[in-house]
Image: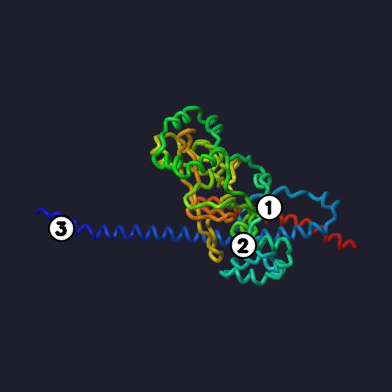
Amino acid sequence: MRLSRRFLLRRRRPLLDLLSRVVAQRAQSRRQVLHDLHKKRVRALVQLSLLSRYLHRRAEHLHTLVPRAVRRGMLRVAGAPPQPYTRVLHQLAATYWQAATAPTDSLQDAALRSLAEGRHSVQAAEKRHSVHAAGGGHHAQAAAEGFEDVPLREAFKGVEHSEELSVDRLRRFCGEAILDALRACRPTYADRDNCSGKNGKLLRKLVAGDVRIKVVRDVRPNSPISLFTPISEEPLAAVAATEIAEGEPIAQYAGELICEDDEEPADNSYLYELDPKEMRERGYSGKTLRINARTRGGVSRFINDCWSPEGLPARTPNCFAALVFDGKAKLPRMVVFATANIPQGSEIIIDYGPDYWKITTRTLLQAHAESALTNHERCAKYEEWLASSASSQ
């Protein structure tokens, strides 16, 4: 007996519905697991940031109590051995957590403590410490403004400053073959529109090395940048150096053009991968290309992500990065465009996506853990000497 097609489809539909429900439930469960893992990492990052700040402050205080000649004789702490951040919390938090009393907290410390205790209103902590901040003079005025100017030589410490896209490393590693493949590419209609349209002149200036943004130090008490940047580093950000209209190019993501076979450290958060699908639209079918700004780059490397943990003010992206193929130079360029009107002095904020924070969260956790261990050893040495000095008297 032959069964009709309609009958078979009617019998098959419940199975397909069941299968789709199972797939949807598994996908939802996976998203929930990733969400819970992210929350745990953020909670650990908040606690470690507060802990490393307190240990650094305590070590600096003890540093002033120990004579200089004695400090010279002590063994230098070159750097704490890498350990899991959970172990650092178990070893140190019980000793130092309660000691970091609120009266000695800065605005940043108060905001971190508010997040660590599960209070999602850092404005209350900011209000309680307004009198303390007002006594800070220049610091309080800078905190109200939000940003401080930073000389480029300080911002690019340890990094070669260049607003150009370099192909020297690509040529050394892959030879001329990959450059020949790029020379054979053709710009798309969108590329030609970007390079010769109303924003073409601005884009050509940016490619030539012009800049429309500047690097500043973030001193806002409730900014994730100032809260989670390791104490040994500067909390830097990028702001508009001039008025920027919606749709205008802001900056070129400058750095070194490299291929996927040219390995970079796993914690490199300055690596921008060019979409292979978009490159194929230009006629390129070779190895995946990347722009690396870790050791060489321009001011665009200081554009920060829009991420902000629950309890802090939301950060809305005002730009995005797009691939533009330069038909004259025969090079792919990553250009940042404005999605809204950006006033002069406003921060440039972008959404780098979840993959960026998978790398950055691990890097920040490790940096704060090493800072906490290093300053813990400094405190132990100073306290040991002070105790022995007091007993001998």
Answer above or below: position of 282 versus 311. above
Residue ID for mark 2: 47
Identify the amino acid type marked 1. Ser
Q: Quadrant of residue 32?
A: bottom left
**Whether residue 317 is situated above or below residue 284 in the rendered picture:** below
User: x, y percentage for residue 185?
Assistant: 42, 33
Residue bearing the label numbered 3: 7
Residue 342, numbered label: none
Check disc 3 and report its element: helix, strand or loop.
helix
The Cα atoms of the two marked residues, 2 and 3, are separated by 61 Å
**Image coords of residue 297 (percent x, y):** 59, 41
Q: What is the distance, in whole Å, between disc 3 and disc 1 at their CAs? A: 70 Å
> Which disc is residue 232 wearing?
1
Task: Give the residue type at disc 2.
Answer: Gln
Q: Position of residue 166 (x, y in %)?
A: 55, 35
Q: Residue furthest top?
A: 176
Q: Is residue 35 left or right of residue 77?
A: left
